[in-house]
Amino acid sequence: MDTKFINEIERYGADGFKACFDCGTCTAVCNLSEPGHSFPRYFVRLAKTGQKDEILRSRELWLCYACGDCSENCPRNADPAELIAALRRYTIASYEPTGLTKLIFKNNPLYILITLVLAVIFAMVLLSFRPESGVSRWLFQYVDYQTIHYGGILLALLLILSIIYGFVRSIKNYAADGKAKFWETLKQTLVEIGVFKRYQSCDIYDDSYWYNKPWFVKPWFLHFSIFWGFVLLFVATGMDYLFKDPNVDVWWPTRILGTLGGLLLMYGSTLIVAYRLVKPTKIYQSTKMADWIFLAFIWLTGFTGFWLEVAIFAHNHSILTHVILFAHIICAAEMFLLFAFSKFAHALYRPIALYNYFKTKS
Ligand code: SF4
Ligand code: SF4
């Protein structure tokens, strides 16, 4: 137990939870809470008593989809959903050994500068693997190729080591006993990741703001859209690297996949930005700097990607196209950085937590 933990977790963005008087309404309204996996009240108790080890070992933290039903119904305005978000930030920061994530989540403005400089370096490193391309020739007139290429590879290795460290710690911490078969559990996990079935079971009560809204504007679908946008873009980038895109035809299969991925990514991120601005429910009322940066880079990656599509279609090889391509690569590099150092890391920890959750259920 650590009585100072309350102050620490406040710096990660949770402040209302001290008002909790243990009524249990939040657990009652949460559709994902169940015996043996009871939250969010459980987390209020852990946070108040400062049980840090228990928090770091808790896979339930990643089972919540941040729908906000619990906060909407809390009679004390204790905002348990925000507490869960803060505990996740704390966990991501604790699993990341460089200390950069602590800066990010404690809203230190230095973080924008540091991650942006790193993203620019990584973008140049990526370009250094294709020195014959137009944008590389343009860029390496101004910066030293060798320094960027080898220095950047070293930085990337450090980053990858940091991701591996978090990955190994989470596997160790979230491991569960169970007799379930590996493939069956893996299948359940992949289905959940792919279709967000549990997330779809949130917001189903008739007093929910989303109850009568069409499926394509519901929060679960926006997350689904961003997830598949990333998957398709990842596949398209891999295919582009393997099969060498002729770089002229927008109907090339790799480009069609990329365009579809970009559309999904922009659709989901645009609506989430709109919700964070309009604040239709409590969960959208407080947006941290790290959340804005994360959303901004997702959106910019999509926007610059489409700009390049149009430029290719119009056979436009002007200096502006080179600059936009460079900006697009910086955004992609920032995404790579954010994977370890931001809420994006949930893409790593949630599948591990889900796998172990299904293992205990079978
Ligand atoms: S509903 Fe609010 S006051 Fe009641 S247990 Fe949950 S967080 Fe505490
Ligand atoms: S945010 Fe939604 S899923 Fe998460 S604990 Fe609250 S009600 Fe449950």
Image (cartoon, rainbow, N blue to C red):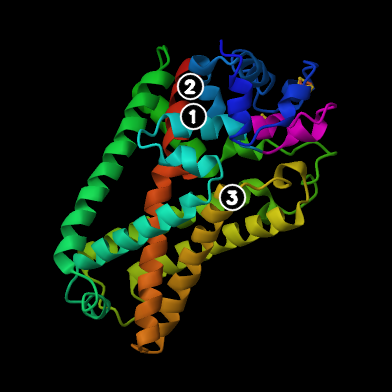
Q: Which residue is mark 3?
A: 289
Q: In the figure, 52 relative to 84: above or below?
A: above
Secondary structure beneath dot 2 equals: helix
Q: Can I make out residue 312 in this image?
A: no
In the displayed structure image, the side of residue 127 where residue 109 appears, left or right: right
Residue 293 part of the magenta-drawn span: no
Secondary structure beneath dot 3 equals: helix
Q: In the figure, 100 relative to 76: above or below?
A: below
Q: In the figure, 149 relative to 215: above or below?
A: below
Along the line of sight, the residue nearer the viewer: 93 or 262: 93
- Give me the residue at 42% from left, 32% from top: 187
Q: Which residue is mark 2?
A: 56
Residue 139 x %, y %: 26, 76
Along the line of sight, the residue nearer the viewer: 161 or 150: 150
| Few, some or many residues within 10 Å of mark 2 (<14, 14–19, 20+) | many
Write the start and end of the magenta stretch as one range. 67-83
Q: Can I make out residue 339 in this image?
A: yes
Q: Which residue is mark 1?
A: 91
- Discs 2, 1 touching: Cβ within 8 Å: yes
In the displayed structure image, the side of residue 8 where residue 165 appears, left or right: left
Residues under labels 2 and 1: Cα distance? 6 Å
Mark 1 vs ligand 2: CB under 8 Å?
A: no
3 or 2: tag closer to the N-terminus? 2
Marks 3, 2: nearer the viewer: 3
Q: Amino acid at mark 2?
A: Leu
Residue 113 x %, y %: 45, 56
| Few, some or many residues within 10 Å of mark 3 (<14, 14–19, 20+) | some
Name, please, the residue furthest toward the left.
146
Residue 210 x %, y %: 77, 46
